[in-house]
Amino acid sequence: MGFKGLCLSIFDYKTEKFVIAQNKKVGILYRLIQLGILSYLVGWVFITKKGYQETDTAIQSSVVTKLKGVAFIDANITGKGLWDVGDYVIPPQGERVFFIITNFIITRHQRQGICAENEDIPDGRCKVDSDCQKNTLVKVGHGVKTGRCLNNRTCEIYAWCPVESGRVPSESTLKGAENFTVYIKNNIRFPKFNFAKNNVFVGKNISYLKSCQFNTEENLYCPIFRLGDIVSLAGSNFQEMAVKVKCIGGSIGMQSDLMEIYWVQFHLDNSESCSISTPYQRFASYYQDANGTDYRTLTKAYGIRFDIIVNGKAGKFNIVPTMINIGSGLALLGAGAFFCDLVLLYIIKRSNVYRGRKYESVK
Amino acid sequence: MGFKGLCLSIFDYKTEKFVIAQNKKVGILYRLIQLGILSYLVGWVFITKKGYQETDTAIQSSVVTKLKGVAFIDANITGKGLWDVGDYVIPPQGERVFFIITNFIITRHQRQGICAENEDIPDGRCKVDSDCQKNTLVKVGHGVKTGRCLNNRTCEIYAWCPVESGRVPSESTLKGAENFTVYIKNNIRFPKFNFAKNNVFVGKNISYLKSCQFNTEENLYCPIFRLGDIVSLAGSNFQEMAVKVKCIGGSIGMQSDLMEIYWVQFHLDNSESCSISTPYQRFASYYQDANGTDYRTLTKAYGIRFDIIVNGKAGKFNIVPTMINIGSGLALLGAGAFFCDLVLLYIIKRSNVYRGRKYESVK
Amino acid sequence: MGFKGLCLSIFDYKTEKFVIAQNKKVGILYRLIQLGILSYLVGWVFITKKGYQETDTAIQSSVVTKLKGVAFIDANITGKGLWDVGDYVIPPQGERVFFIITNFIITRHQRQGICAENEDIPDGRCKVDSDCQKNTLVKVGHGVKTGRCLNNRTCEIYAWCPVESGRVPSESTLKGAENFTVYIKNNIRFPKFNFAKNNVFVGKNISYLKSCQFNTEENLYCPIFRLGDIVSLAGSNFQEMAVKVKCIGGSIGMQSDLMEIYWVQFHLDNSESCSISTPYQRFASYYQDANGTDYRTLTKAYGIRFDIIVNGKAGKFNIVPTMINIGSGLALLGAGAFFCDLVLLYIIKRSNVYRGRKYESVK
């Protein structure tokens, strides 16, 4: 028709031609399907699962901890009667992961030299000198064999002597450690929304924050936790844990919806997976005697390891996921119509009539 | 018609019958709606929000830091005149989180024994012996009460003696700490794309990297930062911070589009949340005297805590999100047509004519 | 017709009127397009990319490591003949990041005082006293200039004396360090599904776990790794690395589908990015002499830095992504139909006939 006609025809409005089948059964079926899809879309996708939001789970967090408390310990075993924060926390920096010593084996005045290997090490046992091959390392042991077998029992080795031996005392735990308190400050940030918050500023004043203690009923926003309470929340008993030396993962979950952060769950992960390997650490403190010779104290420290893990999810309205969900809901309505068409054209009575009216054949 | 007829009929092509309403108003409305949806899809979803990409925000990062610098300190207070890296950085490993000591209270030659509790501890104050119940811990204190009240002022306790006391000197800061430099090396990896990169290899040579200093105009790719600059970038003043002891979160953001990583933002999070709890640490250094008795030096160190937090997002073209967005755009076009149908059939003049032509009734 | 009529008309079923074009070519084209879209949807989106799942990549992990092993070292250099775990691991806590010392420069008995700066420091060199400006810090040096030039060579400085000097011995490495073993326990948790697991409990008994050693063929589930093997898996040679002092990122990937975790890849990231900056650490051990004066031993330790990075992805069936993918597939089918309409109405022969039958004009 020419260019002008073409341009005008762009603005013609085309609408599909419909056949109205006055079959109420299919009509009701179709309305039910529509209602189902709509309920799914509004009730499940939008309201329950918040499908109108974009989410950010890549939470950044910075945790600072501070222990407080002193506890008595049996002086005969250790030579130290009272332990404070400088003594029982490793490391002292107050980070996300810290270890409280509750029991230990101390080996003092170790010097480099020659002595007998520990009897408990299988590869260190011997009957005669030839059992101890010179200059070979003792497997899972403490040093290098010199070639001699001492007392027909254990190899002589070059190592830090005397070697560590003994069993951890079953009684000399740090008594009162369950009353220690840990202050946990957690700064979080959701980079996608550039939203930052921390658990301390939730509307409380400084004096409250300095003296409160967390509990699940009243003081949900208090950042100071008693160690015994933490362990109870994990479903365990502190003294039992201090001896059996399990480990605790501290998990602080925070959920955010439309930018409201609230303290949801303080969840401790005290799974049986900890019992396979008893958490302990070995560390050495070095000294020099009057001659300038190094000697050291080796400590095998048992205790409870705390690991504060933070997860969180922030959500904010966003047009793109909203439109995606609306769009897929509309497409599902189309599928519903297709299904009802099948019913109308092939299943019900008089379907041939509808088939004849719906389809026009062109030769 | 038989099986063959059925097979042939599968390849018949069915197309909807349309009614062309030559009402230009509805036609223009429909074209506008189509244009709107298309602009949204192309302009917002694909171009601005990069809807054709799948993204990875689960960035893995490994940060190594190295401090350099020495500073003078008032020898009368501490007995040490000059501090270098071995003295002021905790911990020394050069990790993501480190603490620079700028001020401190040192308590030397502490030994386990009996002495007076610090006057500042409320629970340690007393008038008579009965105020100090024997064998009870001093709340938020340093030790265990022996049952005696000394000088009608404070309880006698068993603790590491002498107990820590005093206020942090307001002047004896580590002078010159703002000139320290920190070298930050950050290896990142996006596991979804198996793509790894670090901030050092951006095409610079080794001599540049060893001697440069970061600034936001010229040396954006230099991994060496002056501490004073970091604090200024955070909007603070170094000397002020060193005394008021706030904390800094260092955040290095990297964005990647089609696998090009660029150094976007060095953002420091210096929120007021740090002022509630002054960052300090207590740590002890242990010594032994000639008799082999333990004694220690307790240091309460104030300073600035640096926490390097890395976030990043990588994106790469992927057919699935592309198709999802295209699909939902198409479905929205269908909604637009439905809306225009409503206008055509119920709102405009002569709508009854269109209704009559659009719908065929079957009895 | 009144309200009742309106209500009844809601349950009328409307179905589009279709024109059947018996053009087999367009029919086959349309079926091919439908088949293509269906294959994409089922084969790629659902089966390959698991589009029916919601995923969680925000894995939380808690890693504990434990080193074992002793090694000999040349006693002349260090004064210590045998190193065990207390000596060569920094830090001792057994965390995700640890450093094994394989070579070092030790400077003993450093005291605060006056001595000559190290010759290797450019800013410390001088010819006459005026080259050393009093009370200025030596750039990248060890202390503060006093104003004197010693021996026409280096400035006299106030620092921890004697200053560190010398080159790292090329031979005195920790011999046998490649035989050390590291036990890596990794607890993971996917917060979205509240699913936790660790790498130790995969059905093995305790005795196996205590004595096994990881290798890629048989012992895939053993959590004990030999250091030399780790380095080989990274494609490097241990002795080479111990001297050239590179760094290793340990990456343990785990994938989960329908909640089955399996040990997929132990991937080490040994990129060239490490060679720019040699990993070393400086740390000081403090002692007191009989007069109570502080002195220290400064160690510049070279070695291998291990950084265990955990990533993982968990997936679980979810109706929402399933419906979104189905919905977008249906919308794409609509686009396919639109394309075939274009072919039918404008491209093939007799298209004008079909145009005439498809569109009814209303005046």
Image: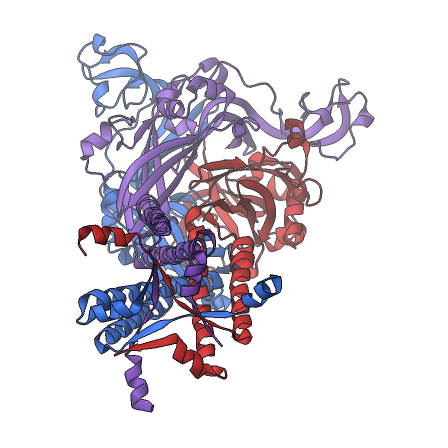
Chain colours: A purple, B blue, C red
How many numbered discs? 0
Please name whichever residue, A90 or C126, is drawn nearer the observer in this view of the structure. A90
Instruction: Pick out the residue farthest to the bottom.
Output: A2
Q: Is residue A140 above or below residue C102?
A: above
Which residue is at a point 77% across and 18% down the rendered structure image?
Answer: A152
Residue A124 location in percent, x, y? Answer: 72, 26
Q: Judge from the rendering whether residue A115 lies leftward or rightward of residue A22; answer left or right.
A: right
Observer able to see residue B74:
no
Instruction: Quadrant for the N terminus of chain A, please.
Output: bottom left
Q: Using the rendered view, name the quadrant where residue B56 is placed.
A: bottom left
Observer able to see residue C220:
yes
Q: Is residue C82 above or below residue B86?
A: above
Q: Is residue B312 above or below residue C223?
A: below
Residue A314 location in percent, x, y? Answer: 32, 47
Q: Using the rendered view, name the quadrant where residue A160 is placed.
A: top right
Residue A39 location in percent, x, y? Answer: 32, 46
Q: Judge from the rendering whether residue B269 lies leftward or rightward of residue B327; answer left or right.
A: left
Residue A203 location in percent, x, y? Answer: 19, 38
Q: Judge from the rendering whether residue C307 lies leftward or rightward of residue A55; answer left or right.
A: right
Which residue is at a point 56% across and 33% down the rendered structure image?
Answer: A293
